[in-house]
Image (tube, rainbow, N blue to C red):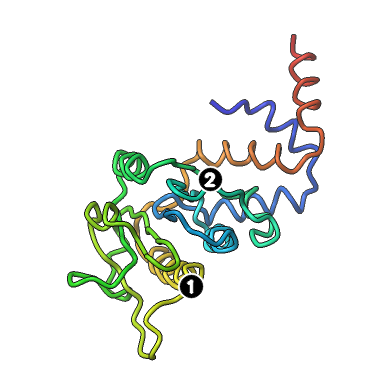
């Protein structure tokens, strides 16, 4: 449970503008959709996807690093790593298992014989959009476990897009469409309190010392 007294105390260190900003952003956050990247080679691509998730209100990002393990590029992410929750996995099997246990359908973003075009995608289903490696695309394991296959309509000679561009197109479309439904897509009240506390700690310098003093005074 979130310590409400601690949250209230930490928020006294924030400006009114920052507190208002936290409130407004959290009203648009969702876990109805999430994103997973699988062994992406180029560091800036994963970082850019994270930034895209923050922009469109996706609270959680899942990164599979079965082959490649790298740090988030702070310059590309533009601070998004502070506001988006990152789940890291050493295997795609573990990632998919967790996602399915949490009620997500696995959506492979790739052309396929049984694929669905973006404009026809059913946004009512809780979904994780998987994006694959720059050259090979998604692994056979993801394709075999996928509940559906999603493609972006393209009419030019080029048959693929950079994954961060694909993520931006897909997330902009599905989040806009989702918000026009009556689905309860927002974070729960408890999740919002958790993020307020988390974001306070990530914003306030020397927050560890402030928290320590707070609990000392409560003794």
Tag on residue 86?
2
Residue 77 in the image: x percent, y percent?
64, 59
Tag on residue 162?
1
Q: Is residue 169 shown above or below 2? A: below
Q: Nearer the viewer, residue 63 or 167?
A: 63
Report the number of numbered marks.
2
Confirm or deny contact between disc 1 and disc 2 (CB under 8 A): no
88 sits to left or right of 95: right
Q: Nearer the viewer, residue 155 or 53?
A: 155
Q: Which is in the foreground here, disc 1 or disc 2? A: 1
Residue found at x 28% / y 73%: 111
Question: Distance from label 1 to label 2 (Cα)?
Answer: 21 Å
Q: Residue furthest bottom?
A: 156
Find numbered disc 1 in the image and state the secondary structure of the residue it sits on. loop
36 sits to left or right of 79: left
Residue 46 in the image: x percent, y percent?
54, 58
Q: Which residue lies furthest to the left in this view?
A: 114
Residue found at x 59% / y 41%: 195
Label 2: few (<14), some (14–19) or many (≥20) C-alpha neighbours in 10 Å: some
């Amino acid at each position: 449970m979130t310590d409400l007294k601690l949250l209230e105390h930490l928020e006294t260190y924030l400006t009114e503008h920052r507190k208002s900003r936290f409130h407004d952003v959290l009203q648009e956050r969702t876990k109805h959709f999430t994103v997973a990247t699988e062994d992406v080679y180029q560091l800036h691509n994963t970082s850019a996807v994270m930034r895209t998730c923050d922009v469109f209100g996706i609270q959680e990002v899942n990164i599979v690093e079965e082959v490649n393990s790298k740090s988030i590029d702070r310059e590309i992410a533009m601070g998004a790593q502070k506001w988006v929750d990152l789940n890291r996995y050493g295997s795609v099997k573990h990632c998919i298992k967790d996602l399915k246990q949490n009620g997500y359908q696995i959506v492979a973003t790739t052309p396929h014989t049984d694929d669905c075009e973006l404009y026809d995608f059913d946004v009512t289903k809780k979904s994780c959009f998987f994006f694959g490696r720059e050259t090979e695309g998604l692994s056979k394991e993801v394709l075999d476990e996928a509940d559906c296959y999603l493609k972006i309509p393209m009419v030019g000679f080029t048959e693929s897009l950079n994954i961060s561009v694909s993520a931006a197109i897909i997330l902009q479309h599905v989040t806009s469409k989702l918000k026009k439904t009556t689905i309860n897509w927002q974070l729960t009240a408890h999740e919002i309190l958790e993020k307020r506390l988390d974001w306070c700690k990530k914003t306030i310098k020397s927050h560890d010392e402030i928290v320590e003093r707070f609990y000392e005074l409560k003794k």
